[in-house]
Amino acid sequence: MEYGENQHQIDFRVYIGILFFRWQTIAICFLYTLLACVLYLDFAPSRYRTFCKLMIYRDVTLNLQSGTDASPWKQFNAHIYLLQSEKLRARAVKKLFDKWGEVMGNRERMMLEVTAVPERRIGSTLDVSVQCWNKSYAESFLEALIEEHEAEWGSIQRAAADSASLMLEQELTRMEEKIRDAEDNLIEYQRLNDIARVEARGSMESRYLGALMERRSQLITELMLLEAQTPALKDASATVISDVHRLTRETGSVRALPEVEETEPDERSREGSTRSGDRGRDVPEPPARLPDSLKPEAVAGNEPAETSGWQDLRIKIAQLELKEKELLKNMEPEHPQVRAVRKEIEGAQNMLKVGAEIEIGRLKDRYKALSIQLAAVESAEYKWQAKNLLASQRRAELKRVASVVDRFEDNYKTLYQKLHDTRVAEELKAERFRSIESVTTEPRPIWPDPFKVLMMGLAIGLGSGLGIAFFAQTMDNKMQSISDVEKILGIPFLGGVPFWVHSGLDSTLRPIVTEEHSAGAVEAYRALRTSVLAAMAKEKENLLIVTSADSREGKTLTALNIAIMTAQMGKRVLLVDMDLRRGRLHRSLGLNREPGMTNVLKNTIPLRNVIQTTRIPNLDMVPAGESIDDAAELLQALDLKSVFDPLKQQYDYVVLDSSPVLRVTDTVILASHGIGVVLYVARVNHTPKPMIKYSLDMLKDARILGMIMNSIELHKVSSLYYAYQYPTYAYYSNAYAYGQDYYDGDLGSPDRKHRRHKPVSMDRRFSKFADWLRKNLLPSA
């Protein structure tokens, strides 16, 4: 994966690498915490748990408030609060101080923390416990606390009952005053409005009004019948009209059926009647009586009694008709007797017609008379209604005033009943306490618990170690990874060199790649040579200036081995020691320091005279020369381009080992002339990033080819972290280890087989385990 791809994603393998890289910090924190836990277990005082079970219950037979849930376990919060309150605990301590004060030391140590938890198996039970190093004092403290709690709870109940009783008594007193005032208002209203006479007169008026309404209905009924019958009596005989007249009067005088209502006696109505003075007994009301002028008989009495004249006249006509038939049997129709009989028949028939007209007239006269009577009855009814309305309003107001008295009396009865129940409940002690398990102390201490302490130590140790490791990693400003090079410094990463710790290869400056046991080193520098030469080809430059921010970064060793590896390609390479103050390259190749580059700068010797041939084919070298103090002035005054251009033409590659940037200004002067590209060397986990950044700022006019990370510690357990950051170079570390094993003895040595199968050391085991984790958990190259 190239840098920049998915850089916002969180890769847990980075944190795994940090853990392995900082494992010493985590281990130290964990071991110290574990030691502290062991010391705590040895020296911490033991604490024992003292407990008892307290049952709080209420007798079912004494539960006077029906329909309310007064279960004692519903009130556990109050009991728990009291048991844990500082007030009750202070009382218990005060009670025990004379006996236990000297033993416990002071009151604060005697004030034990109380734990009260409801028992799940028994619903009305509390599990009360304390913890203390002194078992006897804990038992005494718990017993005293329960006694104080029982006394305090009883006083609270009595105070609550007394307060409720006082409040109810005051309310009853106020209710009595309200009842007296309401009764006085009722009596005064009865006196001012003469309620007895109003009720008597109102009852009479109601009866008269009912009678009038009944009579009005009868009149309306008869008028409706007359209006409906008149068109049908147009050609009827007098007899029919008379019978209809009689039937109409009878129908109009019919009374309505009385309504039967099932009523229940109302105590309040009877009590109100008793107070008003006129409603003590249920007296049946007499039926309503109308004046004679308004009775139905008054209209019908003025009419003449019904006679049978019209019926006799019809009989007479029938007899004459029969006589006429007998005469016609013996006589002619024109006979005088027949004619006389016909004349009598016609006279009787005319009389019947006249009678029908008379009866019709009587009906009309009755209709008019009924209309007049109806108007009179309605007028009387309206007047009685007005009088009855006033009486009804006064009776309604009386009922409202009486209902106020009834409501106050009902409230008084309810309050009095509650006062009685409260006093009875207090006297009978409804809520009780009982200790179902006596105060007991567990034989084994509950603290310190080895398992809990060790688990806490494990959590604290690992947590603090991880926190310190991550904090140290966050605050560490040293160069460590590829991302530091490319993201923070902004220059290309060209490769890395492993830390050759197996045989101390980094302790001396020598050509590692030429030694027989350095197969891993050859592979590492071969990869480094490839990346450096490729970068120089892109820049179209063959002069390489190798430098670093400070000393001991490995720049000289890197420059030497890169030059050797390049010469082994068949290229002509010139290695120039430009560290004019501390030049050491001549020692690595077995050459003399003088004459050298300082002699060229002084113009005492030509450059071609100071080039020395090394024992390595295709590799020549220019040593540093004699030590001088004014190297910077000489470099500044000399035209370096004219010095190195002939060398660039003569050799395929020219490698300059310059001095550290932050130590002297030689490298800055050398790079500012633009004679080549700069290769920067930094040591992993050694050089601070601000220092490197500052040195790069000093080389802002130079062409920076890239950076090489030196001393990658792939041999340690922390190699998991470096293997993730530098996956390619983990292989070279293993290759170097293989080359070391190969070099341990001669191939023909008789003990070669024995050496090959010697026991694997612990470091090798760690290395193999690190390789396995790298292959399975970390990304490959």
Image (tube, rainbow, N blue to C red):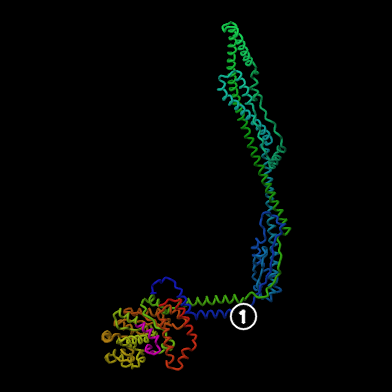
Corner quadrant of residue 650: bottom left
Tell me the amino acid under the disc marked 1: Asp
508 sits left or right of 327 in the view: left
Q: Whole-percent x and y of residue 167?
A: 68, 54
Tell which of 263 and 780 is nearer to you.
780
In the orientation shown, which residue stands out farthest toward the right? 428
Residue plotted at (53% across, 76% down): 462
Horizontally, residue 164 falls left or right of residue 675, namely right
Residue 279 in the image, given as x and y percentages of width and height? 70, 38
Q: Residues within 10 Å of mark 1 (few under 14, many from 20)?
A: few
Q: Is residue 396 above or below residue 691?
A: above
Task: Say whether residue 599 is left or right of residue 29.
Answer: left
Secondary element at tag 1: helix
Camera-side residue of 5 and 556: 5
Q: Quadrant of residue 493?
A: bottom left
Q: Residue furthest front?
A: 329
Quadrant showing the N terminus: bottom left
Q: Residue at x 71, y 66 (%)?
A: 436
Task: Look at the image and say whether residue 310 sits in the magenta stretch.
Answer: no
> Percent from the top left, x then y, of residue 127?
66, 67
| Vertical placement of residue 66 versus 276, above or below | below
Q: Main secondary structure of the magenta part?
A: helix
Residue under label 1, please give it: 42
Asked if residue 528 lies in the magenta stretch, the reply is: yes
Residue 19, x across and y down, in percent = 48, 77
Most foreground residue, 241 or 455: 241
Residue, far top: 336
Q: Which residues are magenta?
A: 509-529
